[in-house]
Image (cartoon, rainbow, N blue to C red):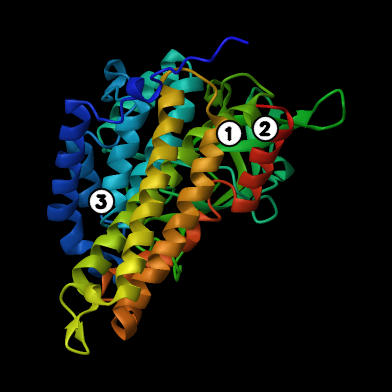
Amino acid sequence: MQKLKGFAILGNMDFNLSPEQELLRKTVREFAEQEIKPLAFDLNQKEECSIEVIQKMGDLGLMGMTVSPEYGGQGFDPLSYIIAIEEIARVDGSHAATVAAHNGLGLSPIYYFGNEQQKRRYLPDLCAGKALWGFGLTEPEAGSDAGNSQTVAKWVHGEWLINGRKIFITNASTSITRGSTVQAVTGRRPDGHPEISCILVEQNAAGFTAKPMHHKLVWRASNTSELYFEDVRVPEANLLGKRGEGFKMMLQTLDGGRLAIAAMGLGGAQGALEEALKYSQQRKTFGKHLAEHQTIAFYLAEMQTEIEAARSLLYRACWLKGEGKPFGNFAAMAKLYCSEVMKRVAHKAVQIHGGYGLMEEFPVARFYRDQRLLEIGEGASEVQKMVISRHLLRGQ
């Protein structure tokens, strides 16, 4: 039997970011520290979504990161986009949610599935941060079971007539929101299942109402909305993609959105660790700093280890997407794992702070609250496990 020869596989693996990606990280981190961090506490307390900050993020190029420059975007690769979300989430989850939902859920359906007229009409202002766009998928009776949509669009006299309701829609009721992509049942397929399509509904459409939702546990400085459709008439030209392919488009959009949620978990965990490390090096008990106690030191070591493991998984998923390879399974794994890592890290960060960790003026309290959404939004953790297990059973 011929002896197997070793291959220098590890030698071919490059874990370094490009100079451009390093510069991007530095630039977004500085922006988040200077423009978001000083306002984060007050905005969260007031439940206020700052249009001024959104427009500054637009000026920086954060509101159309993966869109081609042809339509006003920056044309960044998937990993660069995720690094930007990670750095904003390191400071505040609300602003990361605003950017992530706008790029991943607001822009993406129009950019990837829209016709040329739709792209030209909406994308330039959306990429510039002059306008926001919502992603109307979730309903009171259709969350994880998104195929159970009850919102209906009927074809009447050459127009779509929409009736129904959406809930928990990010960026959909601000003063600069231009509209939302709405999933609706447009008929029945030959097999009896609902035919689902996507329709672009502008904010000023008659019969359409968007209302902000308040008193949230999480992302208090991010706009979350309820949408109501009462005989809303929309022209034929507002159909996104082909009739009956709406659910497929939504699922493809969610695959990319999961990467952003994972980045929010990774960035939030990093921010919580840094706050805990800083506090543990300042606070003294029994004559020495907290960080010098073995229990606390071990907490910090565990937090750092999990964060680095999460980063490797997420960055691999981004690499797969950037290479045009199937990435849905890795997106689900990254979303699941990064969400859970932030939960564990935020828990330990609060524990290290003791009683102060329960006070809102300490950022770890906000990290602890904001984490809870990550296990629910963009498909609950249980849904991610379904996706992962199905890939596993198919041998993928």
Query: Mark 1 highlights which residue?
Result: 329
Residue 391 badge: 2
What distance separates the C-alpha of mark 3 from that of mark 1?
A: 35 Å
Residue positioned most to the front: 1
Is residue 97 in sight in this rendering? Answer: no
In the rendered image, the vertical position of residue 114 relative to residue 144, given as above or below: above
According to the picture, the residue beneath numbered tag 3 turns out to be 51
Of 109 and 317, the residue lying toward us: 317
Mark closer to the observer (3, 2):
2
Q: Tell me which amino acid carries mark 2.
A: His
* Amino acid type of the residue that numbered disc 1 sits on in the rendered structure: Asn
Q: How far apart are marks 2 and 1 (CA)?
A: 7 Å
Residue 147 visible in the shown view:
yes
Identify which amino acid the numbered label 3 is placed on: Ile
| Badge nearest the viewer, 3 or 1 | 1
Judge whether 268 appears above or below 158 on screen.
below
Mark 1 crowdedness (10 Å alpha carbons): few <14, some 14-19, many ≥20: many
Q: Is mark 2 on a helix, strand or loop?
A: helix
